[in-house]
Amino acid sequence: MTDSSDAPTPLFDTLVVIGPGLIGASVLHRARRDRTIARRLIAVDINPAFRERVRELGIADEVTGDAAAAVADADCVMLCVPVGAMGEVAATVIPAMKPGAILTDTGSTKVAVIEAIRPFLRPDVPYVPAHPMAGTEYSGPDAGFATLFDNRWCLLTPLPDNAPDSVEAITTLWQLCGARTRDMTPEHHDRVCAIVSHLPHLLAFTICGTADDLADETRSEVLEFAASGFRDFTRIAASDPIMWRDIFLSNREAILEMLSRFLEDAQAMARAIRWGDSDYIVDRIERGRSIRRSLLENRQA
Ligand SMILES: NC(=O)C1=CN([C@@H]2O[C@H](COP(=O)(O)OP(=O)(O)OC[C@H]3O[C@@H](n4cnc5c(N)ncnc54)[C@H](O)[C@@H]3O)[C@@H](O)[C@H]2O)C=CC1
Ligand SMILES: O=C(O)C(=O)Cc1ccc(O)cc1
């Protein structure tokens, strides 16, 4: 029998998304919308309420809590759970995958996630780690949307023994999601993300905590008069606590290194303010402005 439709063959026959929260549900929305990523979509979640939401959203052909059964027929399995849960999920799914199927993940840290998954790897199941650099402060299946990854970066950290076709397949998957892709080592990835993503979140959580610790009368004024600077911090400070606890604990060294460099620079700024060093202050602010201009030019803001 011939296929009468002109639709191109999807990249995978069956894609299983484990953890259809913000990221997983966004992949499912995109795959559902375009039908170029996979013919059949399966979502696995431990939370029954989230499974029900995924069913209601209609973004998967099958929704289940049984990860091992779900992956048996999969051509690609994408782990979209918090980074601290990657190892235990990998331990359940890898033995149940069919030979040649590809395992990938979307974790925000790479060295620790790869180490957590490595003990369960099989030579006939390539694992290609990835990290879409796109997200919001919201989580859960309702937070997902099809265009989340458009024009954003997805960083891949292929392993030395990855066959080129498995890396190519995951690269294509992210490009079909709308992302631009770049390969780098897991160590480099973790240092880059420590400065561009993890430290900014740490600062946001901290400044909101500091504001909340202020005396009662000042604290109520923080809420009343929050100018845009503080308000912008509160957006990312609204992010999921479990996800961020796991990121901080799993990228400990790079985050602590970036934090200590930041503290030195903040001290230098404090000194300039104390001694009235206008040139230093203006120079630092101008560097901030030029970084913002570059982001706008690169369509990343
Ligand atoms: N939120 C963001 O902006 C971004 C997050 N990431 C990474 O992607 C991953 C997912 O993040 P989000 O989608 O934001 O999280 P989320 O909290 O929205 O979704 C995670 C989902 O995983 C499920 N889950 C947790 N443990 C599970 C288990 N053992 N088995 C099956 N399901 C399980 C949860 O019930 C939830 O539905 C994390 O590793 C995160 O670091 C990557 C890029 C951006
Ligand atoms: O909402 C924001 O500003 C984010 O920074 C989202 C985000 C969170 C975690 C990641 O690993 C990547 C992107």
Image: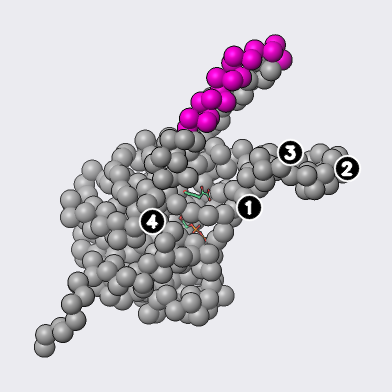
User: Is 290 colored magenta in this rendering?
Assistant: yes
Residue at label 2?
217
Secondary structure type for disc 1: loop
Query: Residue flagged by tag 2: what amino acid is it?
Result: Glu
Crowding at dot 4, Cα within 10 Å, few <14 / some 14-19 / many 20+, comes out as: some
Q: Earlier in the sequence, mark 2 or mark 3?
A: 3
Q: Earlier in the sequence, mark 2 or mark 4?
A: 4
Residue 73 in view (yes/no): no
Residue at label 1?
238
Q: Which residues are magenta?
A: 274-291
Q: Residue at x 23, y 52 (%)?
A: 167
Crowding at dot 2, Cα within 10 Å, few <14 / some 14-19 / many 20+, comes out as: few
Rendered-image quadrant of the N terminus: bottom left
Q: Earlier in the sequence, mark 3 or mark 4?
A: 4
Q: Is residue 164 above or below residue 49?
A: above
Residue at label 3?
210
Comparing 115 with 278, the one in front is 278
Q: Alpha carbon of mark 2 to alpha carbon of mark 1: how far?
A: 23 Å
Q: Alpha carbon of mark 2 to alpha carbon of mark 4: how far?
A: 44 Å
Secondary structure type for disc 2: helix
Q: Main secondary structure of the magenta part?
A: helix
Q: Earlier in the sequence, mark 2 or mark 1?
A: 2
Residue at label 4?
150
Between circles 3 and 4, the one closer to the viewer is: 4
Residue 84: x and y, percent? Answer: 49, 52
Query: Residue flagged by tag 3: what amino acid is it?
Result: Thr
Between circles 2 and 3, the one closer to the viewer is: 2
Secondary structure type for disc 4: loop
